[in-house]
Image (spheres, rainbow, N blue to C red):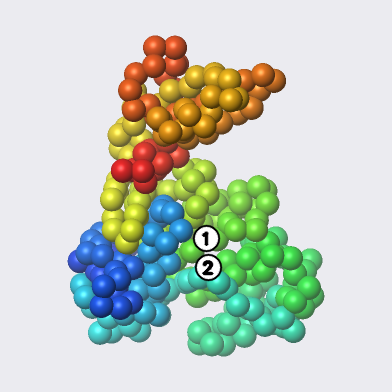
Amino acid sequence: MLNKIHYNMELILKNVSKKYNKTKFVVADFSLTLNNGIIGLLGPNGAGKSTLMKMIATISNPTSGSINLDGIDIIKHPNTMRKILGYLPQDFGVYPNLTGYEFLEYIAALKGIGGANLKTKVLQLLEDVNLTEASKKPIGSYSGGMKQRIGIAQALLSNPKVLIFDEPTVGLDPEERVRFRNLISVLANDCIIILSSHIVSDIETIADEVAIMKSGKLIAKGFQADIIDTVTNKVFEIEIRKDELTTFKEKHLVVNTIRRKENILVRFIPDDKIDSAVACIPSLEDAYLSFSKQ
């Protein structure tokens, strides 16, 4: 039996900027090279993540800069990207009167996907996102999480080679988040997968690399271990009184708090050394918050 040949793609963004008026840059001078695998895109609301992904998906053109897929300019030749793209936008619209099965058939028709295997493909995707039992019900009756899962399914319809997910786990319960992560991790060898999420744990458990955005700019990019290393020996825990928390936050970057009977256990990155604090093993969330506050 022949081994499957994996084709490694390359997506290069060079000095990409998007202006919405003469003075406001939503994305500014953004450069990034992506290959097969999963990259997690982190950043606060308004950082420019969704705008960036719309440009990669050829829904919006950059004001300046270039985006090339395997050497082809997708701004000039958008169909190069569209033919191999699966995309789940943050605001995903559905047709409430269609059943889940009918909706996927409709999206397949829009994408020019047909053939004898279409029914099998649709049924498999419905199973993959745990919607087999609901497949004959109108989408208007679906919960928010179920609509998100049908959105994930439509992104996977065309066996895409570039997958863009904008906040895909919003509305999903923990079990369904695990199902989603397992589903896309199988595809990572043969796809470029861009996953934007405000849920750092989703990125931490699946992404090969991480890119952090702030105010439209790329402020950090690298393998998870390298990003986390930036806060090694900088993360501590200390137990303080509840009435000390407000003052403590003014002096230090607080990552997390856990309330106890009388006191609060604070995980933080200090501005100056506190002898009574205990050093912690750093996480991606620690590093992300550290970069975001710079």
> Looking at the image, which residue is at 30% across and 78% down?
21
Horizontal side, residue 16 vs residue 243: left or right: left
- In the rendered image, residue 157, in percent from the top left (x then y), is placed at 54, 73
> Looking at the image, which residue is at 43% across and 23% down?
236
Q: Secondary structure at mark 1?
A: loop
Tell me if I can see residue 12 in this picture: no
Instruction: Work out whether residue 142 or residue 4 is closer to the camera in this orientation and state it.
Output: 142
Which of the 4 quarters of the picture holds residue 47?
bottom left
Count of residue discs:
2
- Position of the N terminus, as image quadrant, is bottom left
How many residues crowd mark 1 within 10 Å: few (<14), some (14–19), many (20+)?
some
Q: Type of residue at label 1?
A: Glu
Above/below status of 285 relative to 49 = above
- In the rendered image, residue 292, in percent from the top left (x then y), is placed at 37, 46
Q: Type of residue at label 2?
A: Gln
> Looking at the image, which residue is at 34% across and 28% down?
271
Above/below status of 149 relative to 290 = below
> Looking at the image, which residue is at 78% across and 73% down?
141
Which of the 4 quarters of the picture holds residue 72?
bottom left
Badge 2 or badge 1: first in the primary sequence = 2
Q: Which residue is mark 2?
A: 90
The numbered dot on residue 167 is 1
Instruction: Work out whether residue 260 or residue 200 is closer to the camera in this orientation and state it.
Output: 260
Measured Cα–Cα span from mark 2 to mark 1: 6 Å
State yes or no: discs 2 and 1 in contact (Cβ < 8 Å). yes
